[in-house]
Image: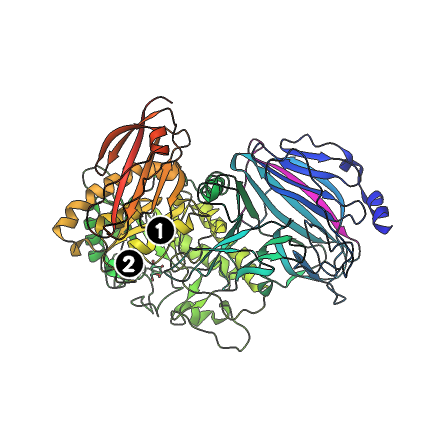
Amino acid sequence: MVAKKLALGLLPTWALGQSNVKWITVEDGPAPSFSLASSGISYQFHVDPYTLDLIHDHWGGYAAETVPQDTGNRNGWGGPYTYRLREFPDSGRGDFRTPAIHIQHATGDTVSAFAYTGYEVKAGKPGLPGLPATYGNEDDVSTLIVHLYDEYSAISADLYYSIFPKHNSIARSFRLTNKGNNTATVQRASSWSIDMPNEELDLIDLRGDWAGEAHINRRSVGFGEQGFRSTAGYSSHFHNPFFALAPPSTTELQGPATGYALLYTGSFAANVERWSTGWVRVLLGLNPLHLSWPLEPGDTFISPEVVSAYSYRGFSGMSQSLHSLFKNQLSRANQTLETRPALLNSWEGLKFDYNSTSMVELAKGAADLGCRLFVNDDGWFGTDYPRDNDSLGLGDWVPQEKKFPEGLGPYVDDVNAITVANSSDKMIFGLWFEPEMVNPNSDLYAEHPDWVLHAGSHNRTLLRSQLVLNLGLPEVQEYIITTVGGILDSANIKYVKWDNNRGQHELPSPAANHAYMLGLYRVIDNLTSAHPDVLWEGCASGGGRFDAGLLHYWPQTWTSDNTDGLSRLQIQFGTSYAYPPSSMGCHVSAVPNDQIGRITPLAFRSAVASMCGSYGLELDPKDLTQEERDMIPGMISLQQEINPLVINGDFYRLALPEQSNWPAAMFALPDASAGVLFAFRIRSETKPLPPPVKLRGLDADAKYKLTGGSFNATFSGSTLMNTGLSLKWPNGDYQSYIIKLERVEGG
Ligand code: GLA
């Protein structure tokens, strides 16, 4: 057989050695078996000795052995690639399911024939040039690289698998290198691809829209393809690049679950396909509608990374693994594990209507309430087209003379001179940018109309009166690096809100989206490396780019433009499926709420916002009642006190707002020495009575002192976790408790 000859002919001798790298075992031979395993997880696959295709064996909880799957009666239309659980499914050889990789060759055909040629193992993890990626040293991670080659097209594929045992996670990506003389086109690239046996499964993803992000969407995996994608050019509000798979019996706190997240900010596709056998193919990667990537002779294409985390402790356990992976092995920002200052953002309070005097007044009001960071949102720039509404000035990153007659530096100095109430701290200053966009009403557009994404003579569709700059162009990248960097150097700016307020419509080619992303990552990498002390917050009309790609560079993201307390509960619980609460920006705004008009109590809004890493106010203190003015300093000092627990604690969703009138969640430090409980009652009802709140993550034998709400008591961890707290709720809708837990005995 040809394949057999290939196996022996192409195997390099170094491939015959035994792996001595931690957590990776290779059963050697011409057709080896690979296992990445720690006490919590196993990922197993092997080389089929006849086809040299990679066969998937298992991904999930630890398994000491590999069990070959029964491939059943093979009569029918299939060939040797059909009734197989495949690891890297290519196309054109009789596997009729959706492939992970689809390449069009210069001849026009799209058949690929990747065959195993060898492997390498490495302690630690190689970087992913140009793309965001998880990282770690040899105590954190080990990497297996499997080499495949398609002799017909002379394209090699190197599959990278990394195991992070402390976070029960596997990271995957692949590289294609064109070793031939003809240009090929990569039409489809799914970094994660496995085939699972016939099991009952639910698919859980986060769907939404502007001001309504991250709704938990759970359905069973039936026959055929089911999935979701973003073709918006960005990860988008519509579908987050994340999903979970779990048996129908899995709950928040019990049962196996795997979570999958793509570390990417552009268009993407997730596909889960149950085939005739009942087997389920799982794909996550780039959106084929926005790919068609030309692979020139000698070029290498690197696919964005996917991480997957497994837990047997339900969706909360799965989320905890992803959170700890993202906090410790993904984010490169200095502030990721630090307490964040309470802030006041000018947007909902003043919108575009301000000058340096009214801004300094606003900053003083913020300082009097206890905020330590003042953020000047949209409206500060534009000379010929002053940014006094959203149709003007985007792209012209020059401070407006009318609003800042003395320039930005002296204005920022004035803000920095303000002392925060009851402290000796001075106010920190932050600024809003939307660097990837341009209004046609701008000097930039007048000078460079060709810098925007556009498709020949097609209409350039305006959205919020703006167009998208083509960050695939090196001159656009340089312009952004220079102008944003220049402003950061011109004044004492210690926080940046990087906004992005529309999707991509007319693209010059499908590949322009990925080229844009590579450009965007280059720009952000450059600016964040040059300004590591700046606290960077991502935003895209709220959570339109809340993805693990940007979390590599920025420690936090504005979770949603919807600041209503109740909407936010649902959005934040949903977002926490994939992303740590420490990475969420959450603000208390005025009522009736600007986006949906609901009125909720101030304490409720503040409790909801306190569940996030970055807490702030988004209102004009002048509009507050005396009662509210009196309450806010206490709310902020409580929020600041518990912020280290929110940043460093393990997050448990105890009851979801979609499922209970009494949603609750808690953070517990990994050593169980302290925690904080957030409990809510949405509607005031006479009956039924609330269920006990059963805590998690505590030391059963230790005693904990509880403070907050009506509690000033001490209970053992066992009581708190098994009997639970019985909370008494006052009358009225939208009530909340924040209860601190401190270990006082035992442990
Ligand atoms: C977007 C953001 C808001 C605010 C405005 C300013 O909508 O999501 O938070 O910054 O832009 O124009």
Residue holding disc 2? 347
Tell me, yes or no, whether the highlighted magenta stretch contains residue 432.
no
Residue holding disc 1? 657
**Would residue 40 appear left or right of 72 to someone viewing this image?**
left
306, above or below 501, in the image:
above
Give coordinates of residue 34: x percent, y percent: 69, 39
User: Which residue is nearer to you in this view: 445 or 32?
Assistant: 32
What amino acid type should be assigned to the residue bearing mark 1? Pro
What amino acid type should be assigned to the residue bearing mark 2? Trp
Q: Secondary structure at mark 2?
A: helix
Which residues fall within the magenta stretch?
132-151
Q: Quadrant of residue 440?
A: bottom left
Give coordinates of residue 703: x percent, y percent: 32, 25
Question: Pointer 1: residues within 10 angstroms few (<14), some, or many (20+)?
Answer: many
Residue at image coords 21%, 46%: 367
Residue at image coords 76%, 33%: 17
